[in-house]
Image (tube, grey):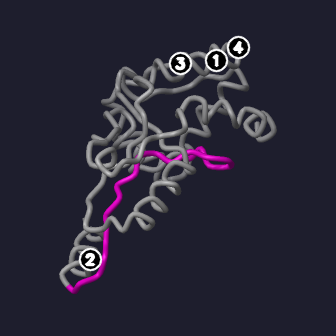
Amino acid sequence: MKGEEICQEYQKDGWDVSIIRSGIILGEKRLGIYNFIFKNLYNNSIIPILGNGKNKISFVNVNDIVEFLIHLVKNKKSGLIVNFGGLIPGNLNEIIQDLKDYTNSNAKLIHLPVQLIVFLKLIAKLKLIPVTPWHLSIMCKDNYYDNKAMFSTGQIYKFHPIKTIKNYDKLLRITT
């Protein structure tokens, strides 16, 4: 990626630089693309899932990533390339089922064939659906990182991703 190349050039010039690759960041007022899914849960609507929903995903609580960045600065750790992917609570089907149980939702999951991706990307470009073509290209794939480098710095995750979402239950209900 171009951003990482730029960081590495700064490293060559003697700058203290670390590269952090983050997973999906969640936090107060920040549910990203998954806001659509969560709104549908609360509205007992259909939740379209591209593919079979067995793809593993991880979420990062914004507070965890901020604490990690502070940890790196305080401990003068630089020159790292760190995947910060968050805990993997399961695959997409399991995560949505957990949230359905928590919210007592009657929302129904509909699995769309991956072969529809070309058509979906077209209507995404026209802004007829609440996702971008890029979102669609990753939506049915595993989306998590190996956290070994992050753990080697002594940092651990403090926030469980599903609990993060549940903590914003009131916010989600207000915005639906």
Q: Residue at x 59, y 16 (%)?
A: 108
55 vs 45, left or right, is left
- Is 21 magenta? The answer is yes
30 vs 135, left or right, is right
Magenta-highlighted stretch: main secondary structure? loop
Comparing 104 with 146, the one in front is 146
Q: Which residues are magenta?
A: 13-32
Outermost bottom residue? 13
Q: Residue at x 40, y 33 (%)?
A: 57
Name the amino acid type tagged 1.
Answer: Ala
Q: Which of disc 2 and disc 3 is earlier in sequence?
A: 2
Q: Residue at x 76, y 40 (%)?
A: 171
Q: Which of disc 2 and disc 4 is earlier in sequence?
A: 2
Q: CA distance from mark 3 to mark 4?
A: 14 Å
Q: Which of disc 2 and disc 1 is earlier in sequence?
A: 2
Q: Which residue is mark 2?
A: 6
Disc 2 packing (10 Å; few <14; some 14–19; many ≥20) = few
Q: Which residue is mark 4?
A: 104
Point out residue 121 in the picture as x, y percentages from the top left corner. Answer: 40, 45
Q: Which residue is mark 3?
A: 109
Q: Which quarter of the rendered picture does the C terminus lie within?
A: top right
